[in-house]
Image: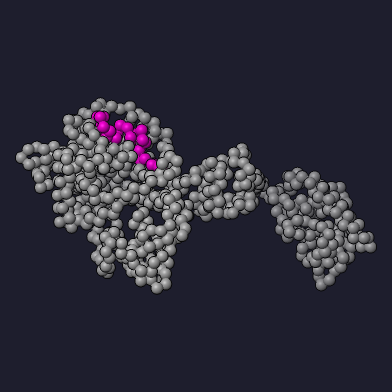
Amino acid sequence: MSRNVGMEIAPGDVFEFYDAKEILCGVVIAVKDGRLNAISETNREVAVALSRIIFRGKTSLNLALGRDELLQRLRSISESRKHIAQEIDLGDIWSLLESEANGYGAEEIAEFIFTTPVSDDQAAAVKRALLSDKLYFQAKEASFYPRPVETVESRRVELQREEDRERRLLEGARWLSAVNARRQNGAQIESREKLIDALKDFAVFGQEAKECVFVKELLKQASITVSQQAAFRLLVRLGVWREDENLLLHEHGISTQFPEAAMEQAREVAKCSPRDLANGREDLSDLDVFTVDSATTRDYDDALSVRELGEGLFEVGIHIADAAELVAQSSSLDREAEARASSVYLPDDRVSMLPPLLSEGIMSLQAGKTRLALSFLIKMDSEANIVEARICPSMVMVRRQLTYERVNESIETERGLKALFELAVKLRQKRIASGAVILPIPEIQVYVNEVGMIQINRYDKETPSQIMVSEWMIQANAMAAGYLAQRNIPSLYRSQAECRPETECVQSEHELFHIYRRRRLFSRAELSTEAKPHCSLAIERYTTVTSPIRRYSDLLVQRQLKHALAGGTGVYSKEQLAETAGRLSAAQAKVFTIQRKWTRYWLLKYMEQEDIENLNALVLDKNARYARLLLPDLLLEANAPVPENAQFSQGDKVKIKIEKAIPREDVLKIQILDAAPRHD
C-alpha cells in the first residue's frame, strides 16, 4: 500500500495511516519488532503495524526538533496534502483511463496530473483522493482500476441516493429532536411528508416496515429511544395522529375514505328515485313495517311486519334493504365493498362497507321513505307452523323506527309486537328441540363521545326484543338458503360442524362460567359453497342475507337470490363463489380481530378513566402457576399468577386487584387478592 515498499523505514520518516477511518500523518520515533512507534498529527503516541501504512515517501523530519515543532510540521504536511486532494478531479483522469483494463498505482496516476517529478505531497494527495473515491476507480491491493462506463453511471445514481439518504437523516434527526423536545411541531422541511410516512410505517409494522433501518438510524441520531412507541408519540406530538389513533386500521389498510371512482358512482346512485326502479316489484308500502335497532343505528338494513289473516293465521314479513339493486356487479363501488368485506363498528368510529351517502341514505330503511327491499313473507299458524312462504322483490315504507328498549316496554301491550315475539319464541323452541344450543353471553357495548369520555352499557341478549329480531332474521336466512339449495343454485353457505363433547365435568354455581366453557367446544363456523348443517342453530342449510348494507357476503347472496327469483339461475358460478369465499373469510376474520382488539383497548382506557382497582373475576382455567380469569363486569379475559396456598378452583369467583393497565400495549396486570373462592 505504500510508496517505495522496499525502502527501509527509519526514525524521522513521515508516513500516512488509517486511524478510525481517517487518514493521518505520523512521524516514526522508533521501529521495533515490525511495528512503528510514532507520533500522530493529533499528538498521540501510537504503535502502527506495517500493514496499516497507506503511504510513505521520502519526506523525513529531524527528531531533534521539539515535539511542538514536529507536530506543527506534521500538521502542515497533512493540510497541504488535504488541500491538493480537494483540487484533484478524478473524473478527468478516469475519462482518459476508463477504456484501460490494467490497474495503476497512485504514483502513476499522479504523473497524469502533475509535472514530473511528482512530490510526496502530490503522490499522497492522489492516493487520498483515490481511497476516498466511490465512483470512478476501484482499489485492488496496491492498484486502482478504472470502472466501466455503465458501472460509473449506476454508481452515480446509487451514490446520489445515499447522499439524499444521509441528508434526510441529518435533516430529519434535527427536526425530530426539536419535536421530541417540544421546541417545534410544524416546521417545514423538504422531506417532512416522506419522514412522516416512514414513521407511520414503523409505528405500525416495526421490524417489517419498509424503511425500518432508516427510521431506527433516524431516531438514534435524534437521541430518541428506538421503538414503535417512540415513533407513535412523535406522530401524536406532530398532530398527525390522535392519542387514541387506531393503528389496527392502519395495519390492515382500512380507511374511512372511499376511492373517488366509488364515490362518483355512489353520488349517481344517490340521485335515483326508488319508485323509478319499482318495475316488477310487489308494492308492500301499505304494511305496518318497522325497524328494531339500537338508538345509535343509522344504516337500517332489516325491518319486520306482521298482520293477522284470520282463522288463527299470521303473515310475518322480514324486509331486507335491496342493496344489490343499487350496487352494480363488478363496479368500482362493488369492488370496494368486496375489499372491505364488512362494516367495522368501533367504540369511537365506524368504517362503512358502503359509502354512508348510500348506507344511511337511499339504501337505508328510513321511516317515511319509499325503499327497495327483498321481502320474506311467511304465512303461519299460531303454533308457528309454516303454511306458506315466499320471497319477492318489493317496495316498502317503514312506519316506525323502534329501539330494543322501546320494544321491550311495549311487547305485552302492543298486539303486533306480542304476536311476533310469541311466534319467535315458538320457532326458537322448535330449534332447541332439534338440537340448537342457546348460549347467550351478555354484550358489552363501549361508546366514546366527542370529548373522549367512555360509556359502558351491558346488554342482555335474552330480552324479548333481542329474541324476536334474531329469530326472524334466522328464519329469513334459512329460507334464502333453502330456496337456493333446493334449486341447485350455487350460493355462499354458513355451516358449523358438530360441537365437541364435554370431557371434564367442572362444578360451578356461576352460569356465565358454564356458558364460556361450552362455547369453547363449538366448532368454528365456515363460509363455503357447500350447504351443510349449522350445528348450534340446528338448521340443515343456512346462509346470511339480512345485512347486505353491512356484509359483502350478504350482498352477494342477495344478488344471487334475486337473479334466481327472476330467471331461475344464479349470476355467479360455484367456482366464482368458492374463490370469493376464501377472500371473504380472511377479510371477515380481520374485521372481527380489529373490533375485538379495539374494544379491549377502550375497556382498558375505561379502567383508567374510572380508576377501577378491585373487581370480581371468574376462574376459567387454572394450573399451578397461572389462572385464566374472566372479569364479568367488562367481559375481559386476563392471566394472573396464582398466590401461594390458593384454595380456589376452576369455576370459582375470586377478588382481584388491577395493578397496571396499559391500553396501547394491551397490558393488563392483575393480582388475585383472596386465596379462597367468593360466594356472593
Residue 537 on the magenta segment: no
Report which quarter residue 185 is drawn in.
top right
Farthest residue to the left: give it. Answer: 311
| Location of residue 359 with respect to 611 vertically, above or below | above
Q: Is residue 215 left or right of residue 144?
A: left
Q: Indicate whether residue 359 is drawn in magenta.
A: yes
Q: Is residue 655 left or right of residue 663?
A: left
Name the quadrant containing residue 33: bottom right
In depth, the one of 138 and 457 nearer the eye is 457
Q: Residue at x 22, y 50 (%)?
A: 542
Residue at 56% x, 42% y is 238
* Image quarter (top left, top right, bottom left or bottom right) of the C terminus: bottom left
Q: Nearer the viewer, residue 374 or 425?
A: 425
Q: Is residue 643 above or below residue 486?
A: below
Rendering coords of residue 664 (x, y %): 47, 52
Residue 597, percent from left and from top? 40, 52
- The relative height of residue 96 versus residue 266 in the rendered view (above or below) is below
Q: Give the magenta part as a residue range.
A: 346-372
Q: Position of residue 367 (x, y in %)?
A: 26, 32
- Compared to residue 483, the image places residue 678 above or below, namely below
